[in-house]
Amino acid sequence: MYKIMIGIITSGILLSANTSINISQGEKDYTNSKKKIDGKTSSINISHKYKNGDILLGYLKDDVSLITNPKGDLDVKKYNVKYQHNIIPKLNIKASYIKIIDNQAPTDQGKVYGIGTDYKITKGVGVKLEYYKSDYKPFNVNQYDLSIYKGFKLNNLKAKFTIGSKVIKIDGDTYNPDMPIAKQYNFKDKSYNPIFVKMGLNYQGFTAGIGAFFGKRMFTVLDGGTKVQHHAMQQDKTYMLKLAKSFQNIQVGLKYSFQNGDELPENQKDVDTKVTSLFLQYKF
């Protein structure tokens, strides 16, 4: 159903200009995990800009090798859509949706709904407010985001700095209530408040981005409502890097992320997750 829906919409969009397609392929590596070994990740995103906004459709697939599991390896698929609309030049509103399909986790068939606004206070300065509701069968998660950004230009160098905070609240008691009592995990912490910072740079076709999270977090919705971490992994340290080069209508680049945290159901601490991806974007 989802593939048909995306195919129909995509076919219509690709017939017009102001459309871009982004394809990514990457490798995942886990250190000190009690469950995961390594894996592959791939995604495709298609966006179309029109007079007063834009729409984005996305698909992500993760295949992860597990140490031992009678159900086989981990197979995750995520579908997302995000719609943004400019009400007035200074005010932008958005809505987003993610559907999760996971052959192992209790958060299988989860749905994430998002709304938000972006208001430009003055030239180069703005504030974003976002709310996300993650609807999982065993529990729900409410997330509130507040961020402030500042853009500036120095000759041919363009830069944008963002700082913000997320408030994440878990509504529920147990991650996997359908498991035998001995294997169930009951949430000990239900509230998280991480801080995040990021910087984007653009210089004559070269772009770079760096970002970091400070403070513990879990079940986090990311990237403006297009990504979500739906496993019971309590992250503590997160660092991200992106490098890219544009050639007319094509951009190629590299993304890297490092996360350190705890696998809560497995009671395994100090687990590193490293993801390295190559991507290509083409603008029509």
Image (cartoon, helix red, strand yellow):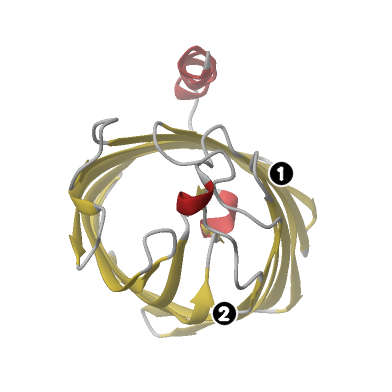
- In x, y percent, where is residue 12? 52, 17
| Residue 257 higher or lower than 227, as above or below | below
Marker disc for residue 52: 1
Question: In what quadrant of the picture does the C terminus appear?
Answer: top left
Spot occupied by residue 87 in the image (x, y as percentages of width and height): 82, 51
Name the residue at 53% across, 42% down: 107
Q: Quadrant of residue 99?
A: top right
15 left or right, relative to 126: left
Kindly identify the residue that appears in the image at 68 percent across and 57 percent down. 173
Residue at 53% over, 49% down: 181
**Which tag, 1 or 2, sits closer to the chain's start?**
1
Helix, strand, or loop for circle 2?
A: loop
Q: In which quarter of the image is residue 283?
A: top left
Residue carrying label 2: 194
From the viewer's side, name the closer residue of 155 and 227. 227
> Can you say whether 225 is above or below 164 in the image?
above
Name the residue located 64 percent from the left edge and 42 percent from the top edge: 136
Q: Position of residue 180 (x, y in %)?
A: 50, 43
Judge by depth and name the residue closer to the eye, 117 or 91: 117
At mark 1, the secondary structure is loop
Q: Which amino acid does label 2 sit on?
A: Pro
Alpha carbons under labels 1 and 2: distance apart: 33 Å
Question: In the rendered view, does 26 fall on the left or right side of 74?
Answer: left
Is 91 displayed left or right of 163 in the figure? right
Disc 1 residue crowd, few under 14, some 14–19, many 20+, Cα 10 Å: few
Q: What's under tag 1, amino acid-wise?
A: Asn
